[in-house]
Amino acid sequence: MKKTNLIGLFSAALFTLPAFAAWQVDNQQSRLSIVSVKNAAVTEVHHFQRLEGGLMDSGEFSLSIDLASISSGIEIRDTRMRELLFNVADFPRAVVSARVTPALYQSLKAGQSVATDIDFTINLHGQVGNMSAAVLVTALENGGLQVVTQQPLVLRASEFGLDLGIDALRDIAGLKNINTMVPVSFHLTLQPQ
């Protein structure tokens, strides 16, 4: 993954995208989850409760993830992840952007799906990296789209400067280790505007 230190300009431009999008991310019907593995045996699934973004007719896509909305079901863990891992005071959001070929989804009829790989850029914790996801895109009856990962992505925490936060979480919880390779999956519903 290639990374650079482009913070403000990149993410500021993307925050304006949803206002002009042809499809908006439906937060209530969408989910982005991460998995943590502690002491090589305990697996926990977490998700973010607030996602927003959209897809333009031109194929420009943006997703803003409110990192403070992390939810594990345990408040003290959520607080520690907000403060120690994500440092939401300085880095409140992660922003994902992609350019998708419009023909990929515009030719689908309701109920039809297409499997494809989508290259995207993620701005997380002050670092920008490029990744790829194998997804299944399905056209919905109401003209919306559903985009689901076919397999989890694996995010390397050190490439986004999150390894120190993971070390801090490990220390405060008295754990031997927390895996720094983090599986990520998503199920996004985009509604027509």
Image (cartoon, rainbow, N blue to C red):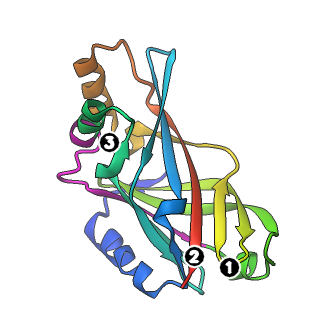
- What type is the residue that disc 1 sits on? Asn
Q: Position of residue 28 (x, y in %)?
A: 48, 61
- Whether the magenta-drawn stretch holds residue 88 is answered as yes
- Whether the magenta-drawn stretch holds residue 145 is answered as no
Tell me which numbered mark, 2 or 1, is placed earlier along the sequence. Answer: 1
Query: Given this view, does label 2 or label 1 mark the residue nearer the observer?
Result: 1
Relative depth, front residue between 158 and 66 = 66
The residues colored magenta run 82-99
Tell me which numbered mark, 3 or 2, is placed earlier along the sequence. Answer: 3
The disc at residue 142 is 1
The disc at residue 191 is 2
Judging from the image, what secondary structure is the residue with disc 1 in?
loop
**Circle 3/circle 1 CB separation < 8 Å:** no
- What type is the residue that disc 3 sits on? Gly
Left or right: 144 in relation to 66:
right
Left or right: 23 in relation to 163:
right
Q: Gap in Å between the C-alphas at discs 3 and 1? A: 41 Å
Above-or-below relation of 80 to 37: below
**Circle 2/circle 1 CB separation < 8 Å:** yes
- What type is the residue that disc 2 sits on? Gln
Judging from the image, what secondary structure is the residue with disc 2 in?
strand
Q: Position of residue 72 (x, y in %)?
A: 39, 36
Q: Which residue is mark 3?
A: 161
Query: Could you say which quadrant of the image residue 8 lies in?
Result: bottom left
- Which residue lies at the image location 63% right of the left edge and 54% below the top edge? 133
Q: Quadrant of the C terminus?
A: bottom right
Task: Check disc 3: other Cα within 10 Å, few if <14, some if 14-19, many if 20+.
Answer: some
- Which residue lies at the image location 73% right of the left edge and 76% below the top edge? 141
Task: Check disc 1: other Cα within 10 Å, few if <14, some if 14-19, many if 20+.
Answer: few
Query: Could you say which quadrant of the image residue 100 lies in?
Result: bottom right
Above-or-below relation of 143 to 5: below
Q: Gap in Å between the C-alphas at discs 3 and 2? A: 34 Å
